[in-house]
Image: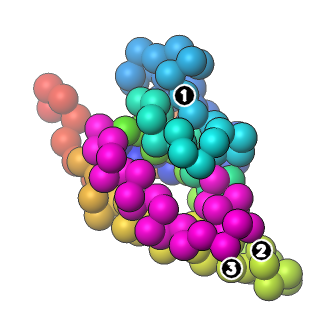
Amino acid sequence: MIFIIGGNSQGKLEFAKGLLGLQDGSIADGEECSFHHAFDKPVLNKLHMLIKRVLAEDIDPMEFVMAGIERNPSITVICDELGSGVVPVNQADREIQEQVGRIQCSIAKKAEKVYRVYCSLPVLIKGIENGA
């Protein structure tokens, strides 16, 4: 599994497409995909939005995400970093931020490679580059 994190609009999806040589049809969008098929494609983009939706349905997000990864261990997961800024005033938003952070930690532990993308520049923070 490859895990790609970074801030909003930092080039994570474009990096993943280039890294994996994929087209849009190979990418599930966590903001709108069905829960049942969220982990079926090679790439899951916007994990943070999927977690928000799962929480709204009163489903345990950690169990949901980790079960999806177990079903597709070669998936590439892309997620915005939410915990690097201001703590939200709204309790529901704080819960989303906390859940996303905890799930990111669990995914990073399982991932073969973890990249952080900042200003469209990927930095490998876990794993070994091929040919390096």
Task: Return the x and y of residue 76 as percentages of the image width and height.
Answer: 40, 39
Q: Is residue 60 left or right of residue 56?
A: left
- Labelled pair 3, 2 in contact (Cβ < 8 Å): yes
The reply to whether residue 119 is in sight is: no
Give residue 59's position: percent from left, percent from top.
Answer: 60, 70
On whether residue 105 falls in the magenta region, the answer is no
The CA span between labels 3 and 2 is 5 Å
At label 2, the amino acid type is Asp
Q: Is residue 4 above or below residue 41?
A: below
Q: Secondary structure at mark 1?
A: strand
- Determine which residue is flagged by label 2: 93
- Most foreground residue, 47 or 32: 32
Q: Residues within 10 Å of mark 2 (few under 14, many from 20)?
A: few
Residue 38 in the image: x percent, y percent? 54, 42
Q: Which residues are magenta?
A: 50-74
Picture residue at 29% right of the left edge, 38% below the top: 74
Q: Nearer the viewer, residue 87 or 39?
A: 39
Name the dominant secondary structure of the magenta segment. Answer: helix
Expressed as whole percent of the image width and height from the top left, the position of residue 20 reads 38, 22
**Amino acid on which the number 3 mark rests in the picture:** Glu
Q: Is residue 70 magenta?
A: yes
Q: Amino acid at mark 1?
A: Ile
Q: Is residue 40 left or right of residue 86?
A: left
In the picture provided, is 81 more to the left or to the right than 1? right
Residue displayed at 14% across by 26% down: 131
Read off the residue under disc 1: 27
The quadrant in which residue 63 appears is bottom left
Q: Which residue is mark 3?
A: 95
Distance in Å between CA atoms under marks 3 and 1: 27 Å
Classify mark 2: helix, strand or loop: helix
Closest to the observer: 37 or 31?
37
Q: Secondary structure at mark 3?
A: helix
